[in-house]
Image: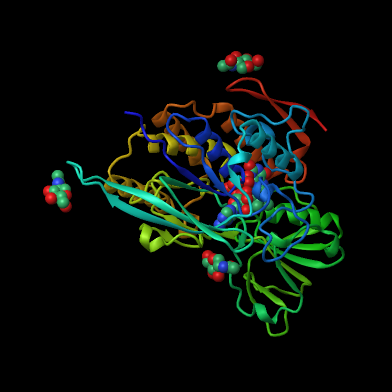
Amino acid sequence: MAMELLRVAVIGAGAAGLCAARHVLSRPERFAPPVVFELTANVGGTWRYQERVGPDVRCSMYKNLRTNLPKEVMMFPDFPFNQQLNSFLSHQDVRRYLEDYCRQYRIRPHIRFHSAVEEVKPAVVTTEDGENRTRTTWEVTACDTSGCRTTATFDAVFVCSGHYSEPNIPSVPGLENFKGQVLHSHTYRSAEPFSSRSVVVLGAKASGIDISLELAKAGAQVTLSHRGPPLVAALPAEIRQSSPPVAVQDDGRICFQDGSVRAADVLLFCTGYNFSFPFLDGGRLGLELEEQLVAPLYRFMMPPAFPSLVFIGLCKSICPFTNFHCQVQFALGALAGSPALPSRAQMAAEARLALQKKADGGAARRHLLVMGGDQWEYLAELAADTGFAPPPPVVRSLFEEVWRQRGLQPDSYRKLNYRLLNDTQWQVVDTA
Ligand SMILES: Cc1cc2nc3c(=O)[nH]c(=O)nc-3n(C[C@H](O)[C@H](O)[C@H](O)COP(=O)(O)OP(=O)(O)OC[C@H]3O[C@@H](n4cnc5c(N)ncnc54)[C@H](O)[C@@H]3O)c2cc1C
Ligand SMILES: *[C@@H]1O[C@H](CO)[C@@H](O)[C@H](O)[C@H]1NC(C)=O
Ligand SMILES: *[C@@H]1O[C@H](CO)[C@@H](O)[C@H](O)[C@H]1NC(C)=O
Ligand SMILES: *[C@@H]1O[C@H](CO)[C@@H](O)[C@H](O)[C@H]1NC(C)=O
């Protein structure tokens, strides 16, 4: 008997959605061509820079952004970047790369542009055969620009809608008293408007540090305010570090945790993003959908009660494209029956245990999806269970080296260029 092809919906045509579509297309014996729903007119997601900001702009890139990973580890493992490019890329380079990927794997004909997914609803049917199995299908409702809604049915849904578009602005008591400008890195595009102004940058992760450096070069007086111990990084003298703000006083000045009080022209929140899945009903799916956490998810991907709903790339502090590449293959394998998934109860127990381990290790609730050093073992397990090649050790080795360099030399680590020699070794090729 011919097997029925599984119908897959993909939400989003950013890097994760393109990766999902490419692997669905590579298995025509098991999967029908995917339907990719994309809100905008283009592929590339956040790598599609837009100068404009506004409630409808999801792009979080800034004009002079360069990647914080070298192309040698940032790439999809099976699709290298252009050999001519330096290791650290502009957002235009990454956008072109994703367009090339889309072309190479002939994904575009399967994308419905200008199509916003509004609702994803499971329909559980029980087949009354000898064993009374249940089968879930998904009703996906999307809306086009003219407001026309259509609903189609799928066997699986890949959620690839990204999670760097909804700013997270932590509450600061008295913020309404602040007399200057308040913004989030989501709407920051370039340093020019801030030259000769005093800017308090909140948060010292990748964007907080990069943006502080840009601002200092443009002649702003920068206070980099963060929770951690003082950074050991070589930062220019124009950047002073401070503790986090505790409140804004009635006179508009900012009080910091160490007791100091300072006036500023601009408060720039580089405090990350909130998850947002307005098309999902967490209660119905047995999921807690919080601003900083989606749980429980088996293998950080699948709700145990509905494993045919797959979240790609939710974890933070990862090597994103490699992660997408591995997660997608595991999930498609599981949908096709190999690897076989454990029972719902086992998946739930495993998902809880994974989070419990992080919590026991001291991670706050909002950091439970931060992977960091755990990502390599995670990817290796996905690969071993599914039967594809895990990322070679050289990826981890160079990723960790660059991470270290970034901590020490945030302003100059991108001057180095790297080359992969083989599966275990890389080398520095020149300094530009
Ligand atoms: C400032 C910044 C710098 C970064 N730097 C790096 C870096 O140097 N290296 C690196 O590897 N990663 C970096 N990243 C991480 C980056 O997010 C990933 O590389 C990757 O682009 C994520 O892809 P995605 O497909 O998950 O999400 P996105 O790129 O956000 O794509 C999601 C897509 O889904 C669409 N969509 C959303 N909702 C809907 C809906 N309801 N219906 C239909 N379509 C929808 C969106 O329009 C979008 O096209 C950076 C991120 C940011 C914000
Ligand atoms: C399957 O369902 C039918 C109807 O609900 C029921 O009569 C039957 O006993 C069930 N069979 C099994 C094996 O559970
Ligand atoms: C984001 O999440 C935080 C909690 O983590 C919440 O306080 C905040 O209101 C959310 N939204 C915005 C826009 O910050
Ligand atoms: C990788 O390349 C280096 C340098 O050429 C060499 O010394 C090493 O043996 C190679 N390792 C493997 C596993 O091929």
Residue 383, given in percent of the width and then of the height, sits at 45, 31
Question: Residue 421, relative to residue 173: is it above or below?
Answer: above
Report the residue at 70% width, 31% height from top.
81
Report the residue at 37% width, 52% height from top.
356
Quarter occupied by residue 281: bottom left
Decide if residue 26 is on the left or right side of residue 355: right
Report the residue at 75% width, 48% height from top.
65
Closer to the camera in the image, 239 or 31? 31
Residue 255, given in percent of the width and then of the height, sits at 67, 75
Decide if residue 311 is on the left or right side of residue 134: right
- Tell me if I can see residue 321 in this picture: yes
Residue 176, given in percent of the width and then of the height, sits at 67, 80
Quarter occupied by residue 381: top left
Residue 240, given in percent of the width and then of the height, sits at 75, 60
Decide if residue 136 is on the left or right side of residue 162: left
Instruction: Locate ligand 3 by image quadrant.
Output: bottom right
The colouring scheme, among rainbow, by chain, secondary structure or one colour, is rainbow
**Quadrant in the picture for the C terminus:** top right
Question: Residue 421, relative to residue 296: is it above or below?
Answer: above
Question: Residue 415, relative to residue 166: is it above or below?
Answer: above
